[in-house]
């Protein structure tokens, strides 16, 4: 009698393990409108930097003006630095790389940006990070708010959502 019960229970248990394993794997991202992009925590800690080479605007977000500069957020990538000394001829001066950046603010000569889950202060005179406060912000939701993703990856941080090429 015990042998007859053991087989169906074992099959159900194995099926349950299979279903749980496949439902929580990365393959289920194909059903989402956006796919999460992760960065190692150790890489995030050293990811903010200034580059004198300007980039083209691709996915601009918020704009901040502090004379003579215009700062334009590039969603999830960083901040464009534009010299607006001559409003008729603005010059793209550089780009502040800050993965996971969605927002920014400037007070005096310090720019504050979100670097994924961290708050980072950047000295605008030296163009270097002056302070980092870890884990201030929650990981960002998908842009269409269609999915909340609980990051269970140890030592990784969600820094971006990319449009899913499988979804049209």
Image (cartoon, helix red, strand yellow):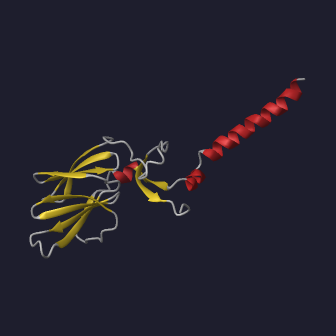
User: Is residue 51 among the parts visible in the rendering?
Assistant: no
- Toward the right, the furthest residue is 1
Of residues 25 and 32, which is closer to you in this image?
A: 32
Where residue 65 sits: x, y (%)? 15, 59
* Residue lying farthest to the bottom in this orientation: 89
Q: Which residue is at the front of the view, 4 or 105? A: 105
Residue 37 visible in image = yes
Q: In this rendered view, identify the residue nearer to me: 6 or 36.
A: 36
How many numbered marks does the figure carry?
Answer: 0
The answer to whether residue 46 is left or right of residue 83 is right
Image quarter of the N terminus: top right
Say left or right for 112 vs 154: left
Task: Classify 6 as above or below 33.
Answer: above
**Based on the displayed image, in which of its 4 quarters is residue 133 positioned?**
top left
Using the image, determine if residue 107 lies above or below residue 67: above
Q: Residue at (36%, 42%) from the top-left corner?
A: 138
Residue 156 as seen in the image, left or right of residue 166 = left
Q: Where residue 92 sits in the image (x, y, percent)?
A: 20, 71
| Residue found 44% across the figure and 45% down from its top | 155
Vertical comparison of 165 with 8: above or below: below
x, y percentage for residue 13?
74, 34
Which residue is at a point 14% across and 68% down the rendered structure image?
83
The residue that appears at 57% across and 53% down in the rendered structure is 31
């Amino acid at each position: 009698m015990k042998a007859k019960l053991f087989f169906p229970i074992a099959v159900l248990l194995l099926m349950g393990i299979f279903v749980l394993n496949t439902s929580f794997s990365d393959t289920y991202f194909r059903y989402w409108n956006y796919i999460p992009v992760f960065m190692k925590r150790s890489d995030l800690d050293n990811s903010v930097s200034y580059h004198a080479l300007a980039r083209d605007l691709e996915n601009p977000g918020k704009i901040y003006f502090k004379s003579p500069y215009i700062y334009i957020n590039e969603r999830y990538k960083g901040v464009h630095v534009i010299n607006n000394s001559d409003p008729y001829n603005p010059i793209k001066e550089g780009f502040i790389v800050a993965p996971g950046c969605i927002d920014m603010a400037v007070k005096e000569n310090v720019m504050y940006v979100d670097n994924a889950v961290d708050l980072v202060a950047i000295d605008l005179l030296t163009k270097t990070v002056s302070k980092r406060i870890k884990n201030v912000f929650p990981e960002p939701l998908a842009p269409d708010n269609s999915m909340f993703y609980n990051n269970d990856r140890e030592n990784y941080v969600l820094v971006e959502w990319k449009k899913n090429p499988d979804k049209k």
